[in-house]
Image (cartoon, rainbow, N blue to C red):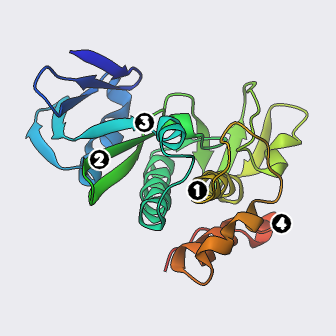
Amino acid sequence: MKTLFRGAINLIEEKKKNTFSFILNKKEYQQYFEEIKGFVNVIVERKVAFQVEAINILTLHELLKNNSNQLSYKRSESLFVDISEQIKILESLGYGYLSIHPNDILLIESDENNFSFIFLNIENHYSVEKNILEITKPYKKHDYFSPQIKTITQIPTKINYSQNIYYSLATVVCNCLDKIDPNSKYVDYQKHLDCILETKLYWALLRCLQDKPEERFCLFI
């Protein structure tokens, strides 16, 4: 066995080929653990563990490096939909996050046409209630933060959660759509959307990337 991810939920590569186990490591995340089963094809299920079959499991950051820093439209769309749904689940449980980073996300690839994305790096959370995130501890900034979080100079402080977390998710998806280095810095993420003009994902990302925070919202239709 080989540990691929260690945290509130551990991910283990079993000796049996193409078999992986998700193991609940911290009981406080039990409800989220149950919810993510709906995003994968479970083959064996127990109270604190479940197994999936997959030809590949790796972080989004690793995926981008291995695939010339680009995802197909279909995979980018799945990334946005899957992770936005999981953010909403975690928010309903009171868990909020400053940002989304490619290292936080796993691709579960059952085969070439069946795949999903899981937000698994969930321990470093903040309290969120009624769409207000309370920032109570220091954090290391990176390029996937919203402009508003990048300018915070004192803590504790409170921010509008949806205006910032979905902006962060949208920047991650933009970097997946275009052939750009995930380690580089970018300011105008909207310029990377030309390759998907007039699609559902195009409009969803634009909604999240509005310059005025009060005009941002997450909707995929």
- Against 160, residue 141 (above or below) is above
Q: Amino acid at mark 1?
A: Val
Under mark 3, the amino acid is Leu
Dots 1, 2 in contact, CB < 8 A: no
Residue that badge 4 annotates = 211
- Vertically, is 116 above or below 212? above
From the top left corner, tell me how far across and down residue 1 is, in percent. 20, 15
Task: Residue 217: tell me if it is visible.
Answer: no
**Which label was assigned to residue 120?**
3
Of circles 1 and 3, the one toward us is 1
Residue ID for mark 2: 109
Tell me the distance, in whole angstroms, between the alpha carbons under discs 4 and 2.
34 Å
Specify the quadrant of the image occupied by residue 173.
bottom right
**Mark 3 or mark 2, earlier in chain:** 2
In terms of depth relative to the viewer, which is nearer, 30 or 108? Answer: 108
Separation (CA) of disc 3 from disc 4: 29 Å
Instruction: Determine crowd level at label 2: few under 14, some 14-19, many 20+ residues with C-alpha closer than 10 A.
Output: some
Task: Return the residue at label 1.
Answer: 173
